[in-house]
Image (cartoon, rainbow, N blue to C red):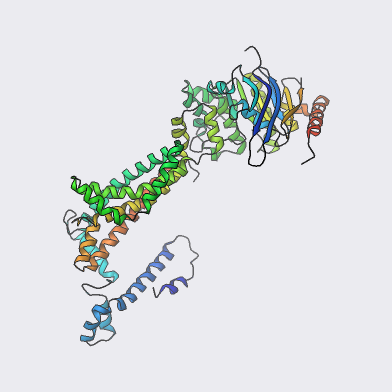
Amino acid sequence: MSAAPAIAATPVPREKGNAFPVTVVCLGILLAWYLAAIPMNWVITGPKIEAAGGGLSNILAFSWNDARPVIPAPHQIAQELWKSVFTFAPWMPKSLIYHGWITLSSTLLGFVLGSLLGVVLAIAIVHVTFLAKSLMPWIIASQTIPILAIAPMVIVVLGSIGFTGLVPKSLISMYLCFFPVTIGMVKGLTSPETTQLDLMRTYHASTSQVLWKLRFPSSVPFLFTSLKVAVAIALTGAIVGELPTGAIAGIGARLLQGSYYGQTVQIWAALFMGSFLAAALVWLVGVAERFTLKRMGVKP
Amino acid sequence: MAGPVISARELSLVFQTADAPVYALSKVNLEVEDGDFVSFIGPSGCGKTTLLRVIADLEQATSGTITVNGMTPQEARLKRAYGYVFQAPALYPWRTVERNVGLPLEIMGLDHAAERIAKNLELVNLKGFEKKYPWQLSGGMQQRVSIARALAFDPKLLLMDEPFGALDEIVRDKLNQQLLELWGRTKKTVVFVTHSIPEAVFLSSKIVVMSPRPGRIIDVIETNLPRNRTLDIRETPEFLKLAHRVREGLKAGHSYED
């Protein structure tokens, strides 16, 4: 956007912590956003501004406060977020908490299922050479198919045999998020050094002992890196899963309704809700990672 | 046990590589008796580590025969006949010292784990470090943990692959002394790989001098030094004579063609 060079030119502060640079970048984005909203909304607001007699004050008033703008101003989104989060009871369909929870529940189910599938596949691939050769191409191929193309089929087919709501959406999350876990865990389970493996051999350890006492603990850092990616795309999967069903609840449904009725402010508020959820989920995985690694005695 | 602990006859091992076969071991004959401290010494590439790995069934010979406790190396490994100490400590970083030492006990399902761990940590002078993680220890202490781990299930045979190779001279001297005391107390059979002449002469009851390309044994020296020795013995004429003989053997076996 137009103000980007100004941000880049800001001198890097020498103080500790990152509050200052983060604030500067946020302010830069806000500034760019407000400026860009004027020309972007002109199609809608232009005639109104002219009718009101033009002038800077009218331009600002109309460009940043239209009820159905092309791009809403940040404060409009903030107001909508505030209204839809705090002014309705969380179980009301008008509440974004309600929609967020619907999406979050299928995200979490899909994330758990996908992570388990990912770990199981990785264990199979590491132990059976035949599977490594036969499964891997299919696993990679599965991720080259656009999810938007299969999601409706999955939802419709499952719907026709009686599965609706949470489960089909979770399956789409699972489909997306097992992949990074499999790839990360194959790497992690094969990460022990030769001497660490030789040691197990001198003890005549069984395959499962090698797995649980060596391969699995070695893979933990890889697991958490994969889980951070997986949890974010599980959320994407859940939102995508809500789009083709004409679902009436969930962040995806909110996006869809917003676009049907030209409620751009509502769309953006839902988008922000989705980002907050994703950030919170990734942060939670990070907390779990730090806790686990500390318990495992990793050098701080 | 009657008969030798380790007996190799015409043992050869060839690695097939992309361009040419590598003769890692060529017609090796060797006997190790119960209670011996045998060192394999030689330059890099002489097959000393390979020979130790064949004894441990981590590599398989291509021809010849070898027995460990009268069995094939594989049978001996399956019966957990030996403890192995690697060049690197190879500790598991997510386990504390005591849980590292207890690892073989967990795997083998042995009783009295706590007592065995305590006894062996005391043997390597690491009492009080039970709850530490490997990264909190120095290199020498880590290697002592790995020795305690190899001794934890009380194997009669201890195979050590340049265990002190990565340590500085001062720490190495101290550990050599401790290892010798440990050998005297436990009466174990030790096979020890090294490329240090003083270390080999100081520790061993028998020194096997090896030479590279192809890896073969060129001299076997019985040291006959007293079993209770201190580092001072390295100044004695007997010690220097032995060291000289080892050095001459290494020189004779050295190939100048490469």
Seen as rendered, the residue at the extreme bottom is A53
- Give the quadrant of residue A114: top left
Count of numbered marks: 0
> Could you tell me which residue is drawn at 51 percent across and 32 percent down?
B100
* Residue B152 in sight from this viewpoint: yes
> Could you tell me which residue is drawn at 35 percent across and 41 percent down?
A116
Could you tell me which quadrant the N terminus of chain A lies in?
Answer: bottom left
* Residue B154 in sight from this viewpoint: no
Return the x and y of residue A270 as percentages of the image width and height.
26, 61
**Image vertical order of residue A101 relative to residue B40, above or below:** below
Return the x and y of residue A10 as percentages of the image width and height.
46, 71
The reply, left or right, for residue A227 in relation to residue B180 is left
Return the x and y of residue B126 as percentages of the image width and height.
57, 30
Return the x and y of residue A201 as percentages of the image width and height.
53, 29
The reply, left or right, for residue A22 in relation to residue B70 is left
- Give the quadrant of residue A134: top left
**Image vertical order of residue A145 relative to residue B49, above or below:** below
> Could you tell me which residue is drawn at 58 percent across and 35 percent down?
B89
The reply, left or right, for residue A290 in relation to residue B232 is left
- Give the quadrant of residue B125: top right
Seen as rendered, the residue at the extreme top is B2
- Quick one: A76 or B252, which is closer to the camera? B252
The reply, left or right, for residue A180 in relation to residue A94 is right
- Quick one: A202 or A98, which is closer to the camera? A202
